[in-house]
Image: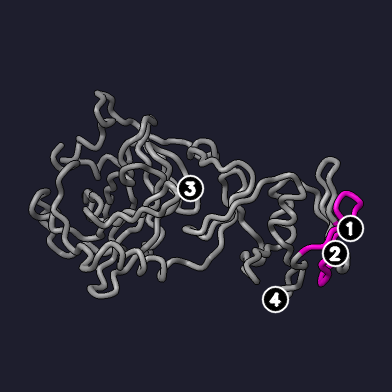
Amino acid sequence: MKKWITVLLVGALAFSTSQLAETVEAASSSVITVLVDGRKVKFQGGDPVMENNRVQVPLRGIGESLGAKVDFSEKTVTYLKGEKSIILTIGSKVATVDGQNVTMDTAAKAVRGRTYVPLRFVSENLGESVSWDQVGNWVWIGEKVVPTLEEVGLKPVSIDPYLKWFKDKEYLLKRPREDITYEKVLIFKEADLPTKFLREIYSVELFTEPTSKAVFLKVRAKTTSTAGNLFYLTNKNDIRFRNHVVGRTINNGDGTKYDFYPIWSLSDKTLDGIIDQKILELSDIEYIGFDGGKQDYIPLMINPWKVN
């Protein structure tokens, strides 16, 4: 169990935590993500955009995600949900809500040939709460909850095809502090985040340290400690265990933290005795495993950066 507690890491960031926070903020994606009841909305034909501090989204995706009937005719967009109704006119700041004219601080408009509507105005007038997540560039609509993978429709499968990776790593097959052996895995994608295991995992991103160019996984989790432990299932049919880089955790001030996990670590040689001493590349990783939790499976995220 020592490997779970003390692991020698190579490639630790060579600057202070405050400098790291500034670098991470500067490198953060400008992509805006919209979540309804904790689940990402997939927009067809265009991504959300920010204009004058207002998020605009494709007209149909948001309405359908909120359970509204959507109609578009010439320059008019209509949303109907129960007894609620919204009528927007492209280019106009005057909308009709439940039969009454309302002046908005922005307007529906055409963006690259697609009709975009003001996200907050439509959502709130369809009866939903809206909050802005500055850390992740996320818009939370409705319940600010994080679903489990089962709640988004994914199902565990037998662990048998994956046992080849766990040779000499049988301790990973045991649920922490319990004499229970995992018999299943649940395969998921980065797009299925956020999700909840032992803690809520919001995102997994890449971070490249500007000076050394060392590559890390940057994991955002809702936690009072850390995002936990990771392990990589590699194309070498072995497992590389990773703890977070000690002392480099960033507290985002909203109940979430960023932890950083190196791709290659000297611990592969000094503690695990792996014969292959070639530096592990990001493309060598098949799955990213997450430790902990009371579920009866091991969560394995498909490496989204693997080049086939």
> According to the image, label 4 marks what residue?
112
Q: Nearer the viewer, residue 159 or 50?
A: 50
Pick whichever of labels 4 and 3 is earlier in the sequence.
4
| Residue 100 within the magenta-colored segment of the rendering | yes
Q: Position of residue 185 (x, y in %)?
A: 37, 38
Q: Amino acid at mark 2?
A: Val
| Drawn side of residue 172 relative to residue 252, left or right | left
Pick whichever of labels 3 and 1 is earlier in the sequence.
1
From mark 2 to mark 4, how far is it between C-alphas? 22 Å
Pick whichever of labels 2 and 4 is earlier in the sequence.
2
> According to the image, label 1 marks what residue?
101
From mark 1 to mark 2, how far is it between C-alphas? 6 Å
Q: Which residues are magenta?
A: 87-104
Disc sitting over residue 201 in the figure: none
Secondary structure under the numbered disc 1 in the rendered image:
strand
State which quadrant residue 153 falls in: top right
> According to the image, label 3 marks what residue?
194
Way the structure is coloured = one colour
Q: Amino acid at mark 4?
A: Arg
> According to the image, label 2 marks what residue?
94
